[in-house]
Image: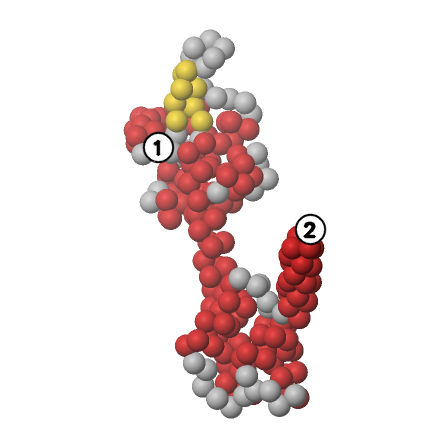
Amino acid sequence: MKQYYMLIKNGFIDFKTIMIEKYHLLNLDETDAIILIKLNNCLLKNKTKLSHDELAPTMSISANTISKRIVELVKNGFITLTLSDVDASEVFSLDETYKRLGNLLESEDEQTLDNEVVNTTRKAVTLIEQKFKKVITPLELEVINHWVVDDKYNINEIEKAIDECVKLKKNSVRYVDLLLKPKETKINKVENLQELFNNVRNKSK
C-alpha cells in the first residue's frame, strides 16, 4: 500500500484517472469525486488553503453545496485539515484519500495473484489427470499447490516436467516433483555432505 500511496501522491499514478475509475468503491458519488480531483489539482499548484469559492466557478453546484460536501469529506476522512507550520493558517491534504486508493490497488493486486495461483493449479491438475490417466489425491494436490505458491513454478515448467515423466513412464506426482527440483536436491546434498564433513572433522579433534 505504501508504494501505491507514494506513486499516487507524487503523481506517478494519475489521480484523476484512478479516482474516476475507483470512486464508487470508496462509497463516493460523482460530485465528491470531482471535488477531490479539483482539490488535488490545487495541491499540484501548491495551493493548500481550502477555498470553496475558488471551486464554485468550475462546477455546476453552488459554493454552499460545495462547502457542505467538503465538510462531509473531512468528516469521513478523505480530506485532512491541519495548521500550517509557516503562518498557522488552516491547510488541507488528501493523504488519506491517496492511502485509500492505494489500499484498493493493493487489494486488486492480491486478488489477481490469487486468481493466477488458482488458474495455474487447476491447469496443472488437469494436465496430470489427462497425461497420467489418474485422479489426483488430496496429498498430491497439496504438492501441486506447493509448486505454484511456494516454489513459483509456472505452468510451462510444470508441463515440461510432466511430459518428461510420461516419456520415462513414471506417471507419478512424486517424479514430477523430483524433476522440478533437481537444483534444490543438489544443493541439499552438498549441504548435507558439508555437514557430515564438519561433524567428522570436529570428532577427530
Q: Earlier in the sequence, mark 1 or mark 2?
A: 1
- Outermost front residue: 205
The residue drawn where x is 55% and y is 28% is: 44
Seen in the picture, residue 190 relative to 43 is either above or below; the reply is below
Residue 62 falls in which quadrant of the image? top left
Between residues 105 and 23, which one lies in front from this camera angle?
105
Q: Residue furthest top?
A: 87
**Residue 200 drawn above or below residue 104:** below
Is residue 148 among the parts visible in the rendering? yes
Q: Residue at x 47, y 55 (%)?
A: 110
Q: Is residue 10 above or below residue 204?
A: above
- Say which amino acid is labelled 2: Lys
**Residue depicted at 53% across the width and 67% down the height:** 148
Helix, strand or loop at disc 2? loop
Q: Which mark is residue 205?
A: 2
For residue 145, the mark is none
Task: Tell me if residue 6 comes above or below residue 105 in the rendering.
Answer: above
Local SS, label 1: loop
User: Disc 1 marks which residue?
Assistant: 77
Left or right of 124: which side holds 164? right
Most foreground residue, 176 or 127: 176
Residue 193 occupies quadrant? bottom right
Measure the alpha-carbon separation of dots 1 and 2.
Answer: 69 Å
| Residue 141 x, y percent position in the rendering | 46, 75
Q: Is residue 194 visible?
A: no
Q: Nearer the viewer, mark 1 or mark 2?
A: 2
Can you give x and y, in whole percent of width and height, for residue 26 in the image? 37, 44
Q: Position of residue 153 (x, y in %)?
A: 59, 67
Q: Amino acid at mark 1?
A: Gly
Identified at 47% across, 48% down, the residue is: 106
Q: Residues within 10 Å of mark 1 (few under 14, many from 20)?
A: some
- 76 sits to left or right of 58: left
